[in-house]
Amino acid sequence: MLAGIAVALIPFLGFPNTWDTVFFVVLGVLTISLGIAVRRGNRPRFQTSLFDLRKQESLAEHHEV
C-alpha cells in the first residue's frame, strides 16, 4: 500500500526525471518481491495441512489394528 502511495506522489515531489525513474524501478522491484514472498508464504501452510491430514489418517489406521 505504501508503495502505491509513493508511486502516486513521486511525480509531484519535484525530483529530477532520473531520480523518478530510479524510484519507480526500486518500488517496482519491491512490489514484485513482496508479491512473490506472500505467494510463497501461503504454499507451506496448505502443504502442511495436507501432510497433517495424511498423518492423522495413517495414525487412525494403525490405532484401529
Image (cartoon, rainbow, N blue to C red):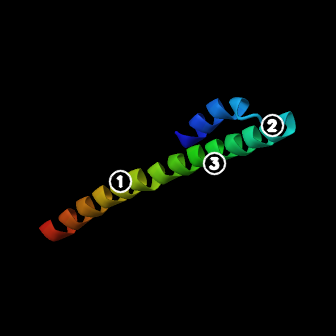
Cα distance, mark 2 to mark 1? 45 Å
Label 3 neighbourhood size at 10 Å, few (<14), some (14-19), many (20+)? few
Mark in the foreground, 1 or 3: 3
Q: Tag 3 or tag 2, which sits nearer the N-term?
A: 2
Q: Amino acid at mark 3?
A: Ser
Q: Which residue is mark 3?
A: 33
Residue 13 percent location from the top left of the image: 71, 35
Mark in the foreground, 2 or 1: 2
Name the quadrant containing residue 64. Answer: bottom left
Indicate left or right for 16 with 25 as reference. right
Q: Which residue is mark 1?
A: 50
Residue 8 percent location from the top left of the image: 63, 30
Indicate left or right for 56 with 24 as reference. left
Mark in the foreground, 2 or 3: 2
- Answer whether residue 65 is visible to the viewer in this image: no
Relative to 4, say whether 41 is above or below. below
Q: Which residue is mark 2?
A: 21
Indicate left or right for 49 with 3 as reference. left
Q: Secondary structure at mark 1?
A: helix
Q: Secondary structure at mark 2?
A: helix
Residue name at image x 68 percent, y 42 percent:
27
Whether residues under marks 2 and 3 lie with C-beta atoms below 8 angstroms apart, the answer is: no
Q: Tag 3 or tag 1, which sits nearer the N-term?
A: 3
